[in-house]
Each structure stands twice: as C-alpha cells, then as structure tokens.
C-alpha cells in the first residue's frame, strides 16, 4: 500500500487539482469525529431535572470534569473554552486508541497534531492582540531588550511546532517500540521452539506463544495510559499558552 510523506496509508487518490490523497488519517479522523458526535448526542438526549438516568449522570460527570479541568488551568472566566478543550482532548484520545482496533492512528501522522497546534496558535495570537493591541503585541517581541526580537519571534512561531512534535513523537515511539518488541519475540519464539526436533518443533515454532503476554502489557501503557497522558499534556499546554497570551499567569 502506498503512503504519503507522513507515513499515512493512501486509500484513494482523487484525480483533481493534480491529485488529492485520501489517507487513513483523513478517513479515521472523520470516523472518530462521527463516533464522538453520536456519543454526545446519545448522552445528551432525554435530559431530566429529577430522577436522572445513569446515562445523564455520566454526561454530567464528563461536563463537570471538563469544566473543572479548564477552571484549574485557566480560571473560571475562561469557561467558554470548555467545549474546545474537551473536543481536542476527546479527539486526541479516541484517535490514539483507534490503534487498538488495528487501525492507523491519526495521531501517528504529524499533520494531525500540527493542524491542532495551528488552531491553538491562532487563538493564542488572537488573545494576545485582544489583550495588548497590535502595538503591545509587537512590542512584546522586543522584551527584555530589542536584540532579543528575532529569538522571541522564533519562539512564538515554534510553539505549534513543539506542541505537535511532542505529541507526535510520543505516539510514534510507542508504535515503534511495540512493533520492535513484537518482532523480537516472534524471532525468539521461532528460534527457541525450533530447537525441538521434528514436526513438534516446527509446529510450536509457527505459533507465536511468547508474543502473547508482553505485547499486552506494552499495549496497556502505550495505547491506554500514554494516549490519555498525551491528550492531557496537549490540552494543558494549550490552556497555559492561551491564558498567558491574554496576560493571565
């Protein structure tokens, strides 16, 4: 199967504008967004004031957690960003966990994280301009002294780059390490059981017995814990950068 420059499998190529690749990243991301949309619709349907269902209790718990998450990192007056932060968190988490289904996780494609980081960068710039005006925004690049301006400009534009590469690097490293360990266990399994002479050794060597337990443990960390932590860190950095741009420490 062909892949694009980011390593995402190309599923189809539209013969327009010189050819547009429809990759696994695009398809799976839209599937994740559809799943999240349907899940939200289901959780928020048939809401009641009294005698609430377990479904509504779960929905209220998630909303309260999201509001508390934003409140702790940005402050109560920033609650308008709760839907945005929750959407980024859910999209990142579900995209990474799609690997459990044997799918290519969109977060293993750098363009995914970079697109999110660009959106955050636009919000950061907007909040900075809103709080300081154009003059104050430009003046900020010259602090503490004028000669620091080029470095401050580079630092500002490298924010989305660092955010995207941090998230992407951790996801890809997990995929690579898991694949290498699995391949090594397959080789050890084959070499070990081939020491047994005859058909029994050949049969046991063809069964990946040693590749059952350890990959599951690695999956527990890289697919579950790491997916949650990367979504958490990306959202925390986004909130800190946005609130700091508006003059909130």
Image (cartoon, rainbow, N blue to C red):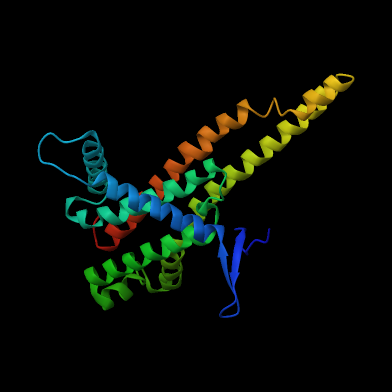
- Quarter holding the C terminus is bottom left
Q: Is residue 37 left or right of residue 77?
A: right
Q: Nearer the viewer, residue 114 or 214?
A: 214
Q: Nearer the viewer, residue 128 or 167?
A: 167
Q: Is residue 2 left or right of residue 50?
A: right
Q: Is residue 186 left or right of residue 63?
A: right
Splitting the image into 4 quarters, where does residue 195 fall?
Answer: top right
Seen as rendered, the residue at the extreme front is: 46
* Residue at 68% in and 40% down: 180
Residue 192 seen anywhere in this rendered image of the structure: no
* Residue at 28% in and 46% down: 42
Residue 172 seen anywhere in this rendered image of the structure: yes
Q: Position of residue 189 (x, y in %)?
A: 76, 27
Seen as rendered, the residue at the extreme right is: 198
Say above or below: 43 vs 210: below
Splitting the image into 4 quarters, where does residue 128 fall?
Answer: bottom left
Splitting the image into 4 quarters, where does residue 99 fall?
Answer: top right
Seen as rendered, the residue at the extreme bottom is: 17
């Amino acid at each position: 199967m062909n892949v694009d420059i980011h390593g995402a499998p190309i599923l189809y190529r539209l013969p327009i504008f010189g050819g547009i690749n429809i990759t696994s990243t695009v398809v799976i991301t839209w599937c994740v967004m559809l799943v999240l949309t349907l899940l939200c619709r289901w959780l928020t349907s048939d809401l009641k004031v009294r005698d609430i269902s377990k479904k509504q209790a779960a929905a209220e718990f998630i909303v309260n957690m999201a509001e508390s998450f934003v409140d702790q990192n940005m402050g109560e007056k920033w609650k308008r960003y709760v839907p945005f932060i929750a959407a980024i968190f859910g999209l990142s988490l579900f995209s990474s966990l799609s690997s459990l289904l044997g799918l290519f996780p969109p977060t293993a494609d750098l363009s995914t994280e970079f697109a999110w980081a660009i959106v955050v960068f636009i919000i950061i710039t907007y909040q900075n301009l809103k709080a300081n005006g154009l003059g104050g925004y430009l003046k900020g690049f010259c602090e503490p002294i004028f000669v620091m301006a080029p470095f401050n400009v580079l630092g500002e534009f490298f924010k989305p780059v660092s955010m995207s590469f941090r998230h992407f690097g951790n996801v890809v490293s997990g995929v690579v390490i898991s694949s290498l360990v699995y391949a090594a266990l397959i080789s050890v399994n084959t070499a070990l059981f081939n020491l047994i002479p005859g058909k029994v050794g050949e049969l046991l060597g063809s069964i990946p017995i040693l590749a059952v337990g350890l990959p599951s443990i690695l999956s527990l960390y890289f697919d579950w814990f790491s997916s949650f932590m990367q979504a958490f860190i990306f959202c925390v950095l986004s909130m800190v950068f946005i609130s700091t741009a508006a003059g909130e420490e």
